[in-house]
Amino acid sequence: MFYSKTKVKFNFLLPNGRCFVTSGPVSPDPGRDDDPAQDAGEPGRTPYDGPQGGTAGTPDEFPSDDEQEQPAPVADCMTDDEWLDWLHTVDPEDEDPENDPGQPARGAKGSRAPRRSRAPKGSRAPKAARVPQGKRRGPGQPGSARRLPGDSPGPVGAFATGQVMDTAPGGPVVFGHAEYAAGEDARFAGATDDELTGLICGLDRAEAAACALKHAAVAELIRRSPEDGCVLEGPAQMPGTYDEFTEAELADALAETRQAAAGMLGLAQDLQVKLPGTNAAFRSGVLRLSKVEIIARGTANLTPAEARAVEALVLGRAGRLTPGGLRSAIAAAVIEVAPDKAVKRREEAARNARVQRWLEDSGNAALMGRELPPADVLAADQRISWWATQLRKAGLDGDMDQLRALAYMDIMLGRDSRLVTQPEPPASTDGTDDGQGGPGRQAPDDPRDGGPRDGRSGPPDPDGTGTPPTPGVIPAGFNGCINLTVTLPTLLDLADRPGEISGLGPVDPALARDLAHAAARNPRTTYCVTVTDEQGHAIGHGCARPEPKNNTRTTRTPEPRPPRDHSPPAGPDPPGGPGTGPRAGFTFTASGEEGPPGGYGAWRLSTGIPGQRDLLIELDPIAIDTCDHRFEARGHDPGVKLRHLAQIRHATCTGPTCRRPSRQCDFEHNIPYEAGGRTCLCNTGPKCRHEHRLKQNPRWKVEQITPGTFRWTAPSGRQYTTEPTRYPI
């Protein structure tokens, strides 16, 4: 039997959406990333598997047409000795930092400032950097993240927030300024933390621009090495295929493998033919190589026109997304542009399912399954987490990652590691078990006390016996719990838009519908409906409850619908398999009730399963811009609805680059409760344990500038803004 906790998404579009840095991808906490990137350590992976290899801070924007490179430096108007004489004679109180000596004085247009007398040689001031007084601002000082136009003292000042080198596209100009600022010892003397951070970002753009130019040269090599009979075609003037020995030529020149050379050639061709927008962002330094490869891999099976449509949906925010966030965004865009090809790609890849093993660099070994059914993977993962919890209760040492690895091998080998050692349970004076607290216990605002530590939540014992996971005991239909988000038109079979499985990412509409239909056959499935604005932000939400029995309507078997343009996936079926019960025919209609004040009405959801009661849903508003405190709790701990709405508004941690699911995060007061902060949507947001501790560091500052928007200020003074989660629309 398959059990799913399904979240149904209802789209309600409103104007005036917002656009900030998205709550992105990978958690820095210890533990496995929910969206692990494939790295060079995995077998069969190259830096880029191209089409021949298988299957604001300042917002990141493309440079405008009127952006120009910096002019070449001109000769100084005074010699070093004249500068020293001038510095010696200037009274610090009278200095005008806006005027250089020998330049026209302000307010005296056309006249020159009088020359001061030359000081005796023995009384010259010591040699010093020309720093306008009162203008340099250090970390923590007011305005340290903002500079006035033209205020760039010292060799690194041009890299300060908003200054010319901080916003310039990558290239030799940025690199040259950075190299000069480094000094002979590469210690960047005189740079503030803000300037040093800007310099690092500038060098990252310069590195990307150099890599883009290298791939442009590789593309030219392809043009000069076409396969016999191939002509240069299209706007990029590229051949359809290149000579078979071009890979060897490039591999020998770079001392690389032919597989790596093939990946470089494939990426260079894709950038020229299919992804011109990505190529431009790469060349300007907005996207580094790793992100370009994510886009190219995601669009590998698309035509050039489809690939351009996909990149157009994502490029505007690709530079601000972490790799995991970009991977999810590209997958969702591919499903939206070409849903049929997304289904076909999944089906074809399923035929390449395999288990791989290899030796780690440390001397240990690795075992990994590839191209497996998503529902089975989630159920297996939760089975591993459950058994790891049993090992922890038995007193085995290790963190949750280590215990999950041990549980994985126990299940594979049919053994019980609890029998290896049975340590005495620690004495307890308060009757608690492992100090984690019971269900629903709220962690205090101090992240060192209480709260989730392992970052995972597994289901209870699937069979209730506590029996070791030997092959003969593991139930074939182990109950898995997934959180499936699917747009209402997709669920009703009226549109083909991507769904999303928490912990895995976007799924094609056919798979999303199949999972929802399979879940509907289980009476334990729960449903939520979320209203979104045009940006995908949650602005309303309600949880379904069964209609009272005395009001229950008889559910009729739904009439069969005509077939759509494409069939459901022919690959592995969701648990339960086809034909094991009536297929759900979802309907969503108004219930006739008024609904909550200021909310989005009351609705009736029917699964279409004979004998199942209809579900009633009242849609409450979610505070995004303003808050009426309707769900405020009187004490420190939130109520069930308040916690749930906060987790819906931000489905992941509110840290700028963290993607840990909010259900695994602390419920954190932005202004501490002890300092008068409300326990309300306007003063709370989920933060993982790492980001929670980071916020309490006195060098960092976190402001909840609107109920749904957080602004993080780093010790350097640079600011990063996170918005509410963007759901599929």
Image: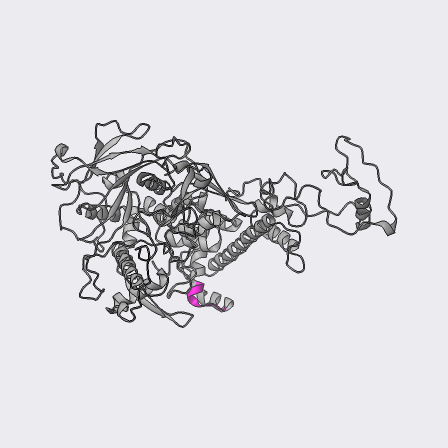
Drawn side of residue 109 relative to residue 728, left or right: right
How was this image coloured? one colour
Which quadrant is home to the C terminus?
A: top left
Whether residue 390 is situated above or below residue 722 in the rendered picture = below
Q: Is residue 78 magenta?
A: no
Drawn side of residue 278 relative to residue 120, left or right: left
Residue that sits furthest to the bottom in the current view: 363
Residue 407 visible in this rendered orientation of the protein: yes
Task: Please provide percent x and percent y for residue 621.
Answer: 34, 33
Task: Please provide percent x and percent y for residue 444.
Answer: 40, 47
The magenta segment:
255-261
Closer to the camera, 40 or 225? 40
Question: Which of the 4 image quadrants contains residue 53?
Answer: bottom left
Count of numbered badges drawn on the protein: 0
Closer to the camera, 715 or 52? 715
Drawn side of residue 718 relative to residue 539, left or right: right
Residue that sits furthest to the front in the current view: 429
Q: Residue at x 71, y 45 (%)?
A: 131
Task: Please provide percent x and percent y for residue 404.
Answer: 32, 62
Task: Please provide percent x and percent y for residue 190.
Answer: 66, 51
Residue 671 visible in this rendered orientation of the protein: no
